[in-house]
Structures are given as C-alpha cells and as structure tokens.
Image (spheres, rainbow, N blue to C red):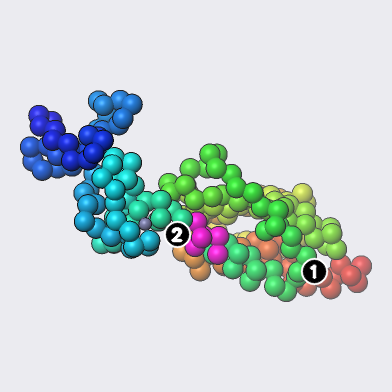
Amino acid sequence: MNDFIPITDDGLVGKDQFGQIWAIQADDTSMRTMIRDPRGQVCNICGKGWLNTRDSMVDHAYIDGHWMHKTCYIGHLKLNERSMWETAFSKALRPHGGWKGMKDRYEIDSQYPSGWGTPWYQCEYHRSDLNVRGQFTFGRRKRVWSISYKGDSPFASPDELKPLGDEDVTFDVTDFEVLIHAWTVPKVDEYIARIINAIHPETADVEVSAG
Ligand SMILES: [Zn+2]
C-alpha cells in the first residue's frame, strides 16, 4: 500500500490509492485490515450511524444487504439464541416438569468458539422422581448449534436416538452421552426433544411410579 490518507479523527482508518478503506491497529500500525466504509449508513438495529473513529468504523457487520453495528448484531444473536434454547427445552419438557436447569445455567465464554461470541450454556438436568441426572451443554459453533448431553446413567430409551444417525450432521452417541449438531432451529427443537425422550420416555413416569 503506497498511499494512506487518513479519514478518521484518530488517523487509524484511511484510503489507499485505489480508494479502498483500511483500518490499522493502534498498538501495531503494521497490522492493517481492509474494511467496508460504514460512513453515511445507518444501523438496521439501533438506527444510529458510525463515529469517525477506528473503533466505531470497524464495529460493523454487513449481512444480506443490511448494515449493522457488529456489537448490535451480536446482542441480537444472543437474545435470539437464548429464546430458541428456552423454546426448545420448554417444548421438550412440557409433559414432565421438574426442570430446573435454565435457572442454573451459566455462560462458558472462551472454551468453545462460536464465531460471533454468543454464549454457550450448561444446564444440570435432574429428575429425582425418575432417578435421572445429567448435564446438557449447548451453543453455537460456527454455522451450527451444538447440543450434547451426558448422563449419570445410560439412556432409558436409546432407540429414540437412532433416527439422529440418519441425519447428515456431526453425531456421536454412547450409552450415556450424545453429541449432535443442528443446522436449523426446527432441528434444534427436534434433537432436544429426542434426547429428552431417550433419557426418560414419556411412559417412564408411569413405569417408575408403578415400581
Ligand atoms: Zn447499532
């Protein structure tokens, strides 16, 4: 890059001789990244524009023709995903009750890269009436959502998991554990419902109380 004509007040974003926009790193000016120019655009989420600084200019995402602050977009993804998980688990668990996991969840931030920094969750799953205890771990991994469960005891109804082996996705299962990647929101719902049924099929309530 021969020319660098600064266009931000801090001098850390500028144009080259071809009109391309580059952002340089404040602590290492040899590090340059070519970026889109968000000036004059409006964020599709918060309705605000961009400040004339490097930090503001690089805080953008351009997705399907829409301008957004990257920070705004990540906030949107976080809320959407949280709502998706709550819906998936509540549907799967409605017949059973006894779910206390979502209150006990916590975020895992660095262990599993999600691509967009959206949180991963872990939930204890405990049904003392059925003598069932285990742990769900779930979150986004790049373009898929990863769902895994590890029980203290084997799946009561492992056949429930068999159809998952026919899906063209990452899938791993043992007597106690299962891991699967879902590509769509309906698949998140379906996989979680199947895993819950494998842990304790709906008839388990009857069988256990009869025993
Ligand atoms: Zn915004």
Q: Residue 106 location, x and y as percent?
A: 64, 49
Picture quadrant of residue 87: bottom right
Q: Is residue 161 above or below residue 16?
A: below
Task: Classify 10 Å Cα crowding around label 1: few (below 14), some (14-19), many (20 and above).
Answer: some
In the picture of the structure, the residue carrying the numbered disc 2 is 76
Locate the N terminus and report the quarter of the image it occupies.
Answer: top left
Picture quadrant of residue 33: top left
Of 15 and 203, the residue lying toward us? 15
Q: Is residue 175 above or below residue 82?
A: above
**Which quadrant of the frame does ligand 1 lie within?**
bottom left
In magenta stretch: residue 177? no
On residue 66, the disc is: none
- Total count of labels: 2
- Distance Cα–Cα, label 1 vs label 2: 38 Å
176 on left or right of 137: right
Residue extending furthest toward the left: 17
Q: Residue 202 location, x and y as percent?
A: 74, 72
Residue extending furthest toward the front: 9
Residue at 48% x, 43% y: name it. Answer: 113
Q: Is residue 72 above or below residue 92?
A: above
Residue at 46% x, 55% y: name it. Answer: 75
Residue 126 visible, this angle: yes
Q: Which residues are magenta?
A: 77-83
On residue 204, the disc is: 1
Q: Is residue 44 above or below residue 33?
A: below
Mark 1 against mark 2, which lies toward the viewer? 2
Q: Amino acid at mark 1?
A: Ala
Look at the numbered disc 2 and give the secondary structure of its residue.
Answer: helix
Residue at 17% x, 36% y: name it. Answer: 6
Q: Amino acid at mark 2?
A: His
